[in-house]
Amino acid sequence: MMTSAFPRHFASDNNAGICPEVFAAMTEANQHHLPGYGDDPWTRRAEALFRDVFETDCEVFFVFNGTASNCLALWSLCESFHGVICHRHSHIETDECGAPGFFLHGVTLLPADTADGKLDEPSVRRAHTLRHDFHAPQPRALSLTQATELGTVYTPQEVGALSALARELKLFVHMDGARFANAVAGLSAAPADVTWRAGVDVLSLGGTKNGAMIGEAVVFFDRARADNFRRRCKQSGQLASKMRFLSSQWVGLLEGGAWLRHATHANGVATYLEQQLRALPGVTVAFPRQANAVFALLPAVAAAAVAARGWRFYNDVGPGGAARLMCSWDSTSGDVDAFVGDLRAALPRV
Ligand SMILES: *Cc1c(COP(=O)(O)O)cnc(C)c1O
């Protein structure tokens, strides 16, 4: 097995472990015998917490991962001849191995492009108006990622404006919130203000990257769209029989506000990392840093040198080859200092 001198990395927030609040809730849930498939008090408690946090009577389901959460959400909005407008660098387009078309045979992704990962009105209109006739897929949903794959965040006003455009174009609004907690923490906005109050119909909410062991939630603000979700969930192998171990994790995250504490912490470490990187000659930050990711353009020799020292990070997320440095709930300023120290030592002398 490969070992490394560094206890933590900036490769992804899924490289981090399980946060103590989630572990504690799962340990508590690990007592007694309880019914399977979600017919248990932990699942009821988690559902109630979602309704508190989002200040509305939403319908919630718990699934194993983000790919399934996105695809099951889209399946609830679309038929096989429909199209989903999404960003060219969105996870559904680039990182799910065609899963939307696998879950919902025939559905087509209609990619739109902008420089910073956030869709805007012109990009959505361009993707929407490519074709109108019945030979082409019919646009049916707009999928926004919050925070985006490039580390940027939509403001409530931006989500609201895109949702209004979606209504005009007769599109439902899906939000891929794998890093929704980081977006909310960065905005200091109420979760409702960036979702249903801004026109979002269904949210895929990430637990894994926020400190859970496994699992994401699908949150329907438009309850009518949740019809048949359970059947699709079961059919696609995403219905957990020991559901309480998915749902109790959300009790751990949501009940005492751990989800936002951890996200605020990760964003704070990313802020510090960004400051340190900006002070290095020859290093530039590629996109506005608005959540827990910093994208840094590094001189090739320096990138190779820190990688050889054992630091892991991706440089193929998004355009331009920037190193994506992702901070987690357990990242520390000491990790930043260690990384930046190694990077500084590896920079070509000017
Ligand atoms: C990580 C991630 C997901 C979920 O991916 P899984 O590996 O399927 O859990 C979804 N969307 C985005 C933007 C992500 O970063």
Image (cartoon, grey):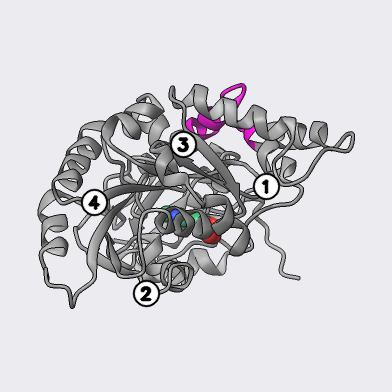
Which quarter of the figure has residue 276? Answer: top left
Dot 3 and dot 4 residues touching (CB under 8 Å):
no
Q: Which residue is mark 4?
A: 171
Q: Quadrant of the C terminus?
A: bottom left
Disc 4 or 2, which lies upstream in sequence? 2
Q: Which residues are magenta?
A: 250-266
Q: Is residue 350 left or right of residue 226?
A: left
Q: What amino acid type should be assigned to the residue bearing mark 2? A: Gly
Residues packed near mark 3 inside 10 Å, few (<14), some (14 to 19) or many (20 plus): many
Disc 3 versus disc 4: nearer the observer: 4
Q: Which residue is mark 3?
A: 181
Residue 291 percent location from the top left of the image: 38, 40
Residues packed near mark 1 inside 10 Å, few (<14), some (14 to 19) or many (20 plus): many
Q: What amino acid type should be assigned to the residue bearing mark 3? A: Ala
Q: Is residue 89 left or right of residue 31?
A: left
Residues packed near mark 4 inside 10 Å, few (<14), some (14 to 19) or many (20 plus): many
| 3D distance between C-alphas at marks 1 and 3 | 16 Å
Which quarter of the figure has residue 309? Answer: bottom right
Disc 2 versus disc 1: nearer the observer: 2
Q: Secondary structure at mark 3?
A: helix
| 3D distance between C-alphas at marks 2 and 1 | 32 Å
Disc 1 or 3, which lies upstream in sequence? 3
Q: What amino acid type should be assigned to the residue bearing mark 4? A: Leu
In the image, what residue occupies the spot 21% across and 38% down? 158
Residue 307 percent location from the top left of the image: 52, 67
Q: Is 102 drawn above or below residue 306 in the view shown?
A: below
Residue 45 percent location from the top left of the image: 66, 27
Q: What amino acid type should be assigned to the residue bearing mark 1? A: Met
In the image, what residue occupies the spot 50% across and 60% down? 67
